[in-house]
Image (spheres, grey):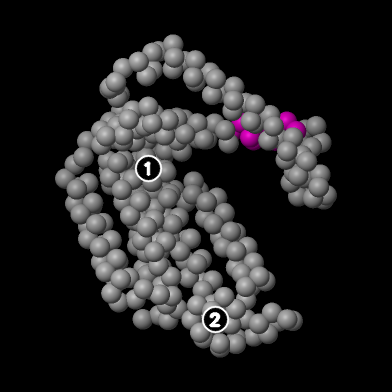
Amino acid sequence: MNKFGSLYVDGDSLFHKMNPSIKLILFALWLIAVFSYLDINISCGLLGLGFILLYFAKIPYQISRNLFMAVTSFNLINALFIFLITPDYGVTLTGNHTLVAQIANYPIYYATIMYILVISLKYLSLLPLTIIFVFTTHPSRFAASLNRIGVPYKLAYIISIIFRYFPDIHHEFKIISNAQAARGFSYGKDEKSLKRRINNLFNITIPLIIQAMQRIDKVTNAMELRGFGTSKKRTWYNSTTIKVTDIIFLIMAIIGFAALIYYKTVINSGFRIDFI
């Protein structure tokens, strides 16, 4: 958490200066593009483009390292479950019965390996734009931009609060977990019993929920004392105007998105596991 009380990382990159509503549109187009394909060429291309954009965002790796580790761990677990539960799913999609290896009673097909690779690349390609959007978007400016494009300011402020107080909840979780660990209730590797880990984690969750409810009550009372919601419109201290560079980025994104849609509908609409 930084001085703004959010995940926002102060900087002067192109994405920091970009209008948050334009960033939201770009992020939405990126999500649609990623989930519209089961094509290894498209997945590799989006992943490479995402890391290039992440480089220009100038976000320190130390800040986003945990997200990379979490997505990588998820991909490994997902791959394991696919192999154990549906080892022939890639064969069903492609009709390719090429057998790579046989481990015990689990056949490993080439098509399934490539399917797992494509799915993993899809999840990884989501990460760069997610990091850019989360860590370069100031909550107040984001809310102001949403309100500017027609989103009711009450809804925009709710989104701003979510961005702003998520790190506080994470901080509260650390405080409560450390307090419980001092009492001998640990949910980490030092606790060998899985059942006790779950119980200890439950003992952390209940106080965390209570703290969150108390925080919500304080914020609600403070907003009511300031007359929040009594007016149909409101002004914003932090706001970002839409600049020419924002429009250029938006046009380029729309053109790229249209090209991907054309590729899917005309050239290749199925599952592709072969590199060009």
Q: Is residue 216 left or right of residue 192?
A: left
229 w.r.t. 243: above or below:
above
Q: Residue at horizontal 57%, vertical 33%?
A: 169
Which amino acid type is shown beneath numbered disc 1? Answer: Thr
| Image mark for residue 136 | 1
| Image mark for residue 68 | none
Badge 2 crowding class, 10 Å Cα cut-off, few under 14, some 14 to 19, many 20 or more, is: some
142 w.r.t. 72: above or below:
above
**Magenta stretch secondary structure, dominant:** helix
Instruction: Say whether residue 173 is magenta.
Output: yes
Determine the residue located farthest toward the left in the rendered image: 244
Which of marks 2 and 1 precedes in the sequence? 2
**Disc 2: which residue:** 91
Local secondary structure at mark 1: loop
Which amino acid type is shown beneath numbered disc 2? Answer: Val
Q: Residue at horizontal 35%, vertical 51%?
A: 28
Q: Is residue 193 left or right of residue 74?
A: right
Q: Residues under labels 1 and 2: Cα distance?
A: 42 Å
Q: Is residue 251 something that shows in the picture? A: yes
Q: Residue at horizontal 60%, vertical 78%?
A: 88
Instruction: Assign the C terminus to one quadrant of the image.
Output: bottom left
Q: Is residue 6 something that shows in the picture? A: no
100 w.r.t. 25: above or below:
below
Instruction: Say whether residue 132 is magenta.
Output: no
Quadrant housing residue 262? bottom left
In percent of width and height, residue 58 lies at 37, 49
Looking at the rendering, the stretch of residues picked out in magenta corresponds to 171-180
Viewer-side residue, 202 vs 72: 202
> CB atoms at circles 1 and 2 under 8 Å apart?
no
Viewer-side residue, 48 vs 159: 159
